[in-house]
Image (cartoon, grey):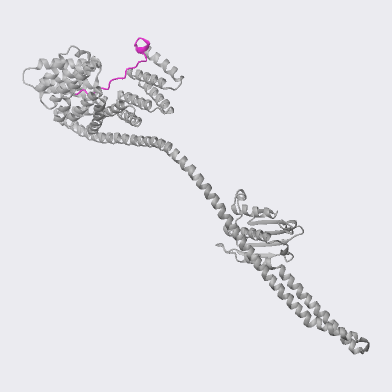
Amino acid sequence: MFVSCKKEPIKSKVLSTQGLAVEDKVALKYADSLYLELLNKPNDSLNREKLLEIASEYENRRVYSKSKETSHEVFKRASIKKDTLHKAKALWYLGDVYDSEEKLDSAFMYYTKAEKWYALSKKDSLNWARMISYKAGVLYETGIQTESEVEAIRALEMLQRLKATRLIYETTVAMALNLGDMEEYNEALKYFNKVPHLLHQLEEEGYKPDKVKRSWLSYYNNLANFHNKTKEYAKAKPYAEKALKSKNVQDFPEVHALLLNNLAIAYMYTSGNNNRIIDSLLNTALEIRNKIDHKQGIIASKITIAEYLLMKKDTVNALMNMQEAYCISINHKKNSDILICLDFLAKNHIKNKEHYAQKYHQVKDSLYQLEKATRNKFARIAYETDEVAAQNTLLLKRSWYYAIGGVIFFLIGVGLFFIYRLQLKNKKLAYHRKELSNIQKIQELLLEQQLVAEHVRNDERDRIAKDLHDAVVNRIFTTRLNLEKANMLDKNQQEKLISELKKSEQQIREISHDIHSSLFHQKQSFSHVLEDLVNTQKNNFETKFSCSIDLQIDWNVLSIQQKTQVYLILQELLQNVNKHAQASVCHVFFIQSVNNLVIRVHDDGVGFNQQKITTGIGLKSIQVRAKKLNAIVTTKSQNNLTITEINIPIVIVNNSF
């Protein structure tokens, strides 16, 4: 059996600095009180570091629930302060606890998360590489050698640059073990051969002597086990014997038992009468493992003893030891050992051979499925953690981008502000130019209408003058001459004169009527302009427009400027109907009241939003124009009827601006 690279436990300073006894009850009581005290202190870096020391103390004393609770508290506090390094360290400690509990999937998840936070911070490359190395160890313990090898190579590449000898040693051992399990023996041996140099380097660096001694013993055990696995038993013996001759080997009972077991295997498969030595080695190894209650070691000892007894033809005791190993393996879920036990029992238990053979194949199939599921689970953990890391990296980049972008956008914003102001001024100028152009066109139209009216008036004046001259004046002149001779005329002639006078009176009345009709027509000239504006409206809703103008309105009292404003107001009201009303009918009324000229527009459209009534550009334009006439604008919408009314005081109408 190999010895995998063991993570060095994190030593807590919480108790050692206080000089307290290390009895568990006292130590834990003090750790509890200090934990509660720290919870009530400010959330600073020193506080979080002390909490992590307490978490380590709980883990070292196997109070795993409190260790996890404390680490989670540190992570929460570090998140509040955006302390990336303490977040990573809290996750690292959680990974250690789950590894100690042999919950390898959880350990892998927390090591992976810690790795991503260290990678994100880029301030602690050593612990970043450490997390990758620990992931390699968890993958090896899970039996996923290929992925473990990949992670170990990643870790070694970083650690070589950092010259972290201890972690390089641990990862090198992990690489050797992975390659050995994958039966790449030559490559595995290359990595095993690197270990002595690394251990000498640790000694030179003043690394803890007891840790280095244990690492030497592990190195010799691993080589002994490696050569036993490759069936080079003669090469295995010297390594195991050299380690067992070390002075302090008994200080490390777990490794001591491994060495005894590997040496026994080497003797089992070499020539000579070595039964007494083998019995002693196997029994001593089993005693040590029973004493420290090392279940994995007990299983390994009983498997080796069973194989040894079978070699001695003691089948009964061999089967008994293997069955004991099988039961312990099932109780502690040691899957690989279960398979070894079933294989042995299927081949050698004559009575239940078929039962164990069937069981062997079932377990083998289930282990294959379990291994597949485990690989998928670990891959999913890595993928999901990568996604979170990618999001965190993206957020970090975004924060920088936002800072840089903020400055750029500020400068662009200032520039755009000035550009906007210039554009706004230009837009206002363009609007005013358009407004002046519209006013000019309307005034030209009104002037043209006025010229037409003047022309008609002159023609009418000439016609009336001609009629008066040709008809009435001549007839009156003749009648006057006859009246001068009235005394000389008889009665019939006098009656004729009276008749002529009546005819002249009637003709004058007719001419007067023509004059009145002509003047009335002149009053209606601006009305035609307004009617044309209303009747020529068209939109997508096929609205029918109509216009009604009070005949009593005398448009001549309005100046050209006032008429222009009335025209533009009506144009804006009709444009609103075209754009927004969706009406089927729209009526326009011009009404002369006692004190006001009233413009009223009715439509049966969809109405309007009261909140937007004061914000529309068109309505604002109407308000501005109405103000120039001192007019009042009212708009209301009810029951699918919208009414806009403009009341223009007659006082203003009868006076220019």
For the N terminus, the image quarter is: top left
> Residue 324 location, x and y as percent?
21, 22
The reply, left or right, for residue 33 in relation to residue 311 is right
Residue 613 appearing in the image: yes
Outermost residue toward the left in this view: 272
Residue 4 is covered by the magenta coloring? yes
Is 594 positioned to the left or the right of 602 in the image?
Answer: right
Residue drawn at point x = 43 percent, y = 22 percent: 44
The image shows residue 395 at horizontal and vertical percentages of: 40, 36
Q: Is residue 29 above or below residue 167?
A: above
Horizontally, residue 533 falls left or right of residue 289, namely right
Q: Is 418 on the left-hand or right-hand side of 177?
A: right
Placement of the C terminus among the 4 image quadrants: bottom right
Name the one closer to the observer, 111 or 427: 427
Q: What residue span does the magenta drawing correspond to? A: 2-24
Location of residue 260 by image quarter: top left
Which residue lies most toward the right here?
A: 487
Dividing the picture into quadrants, the one containing residue 537 is: bottom right
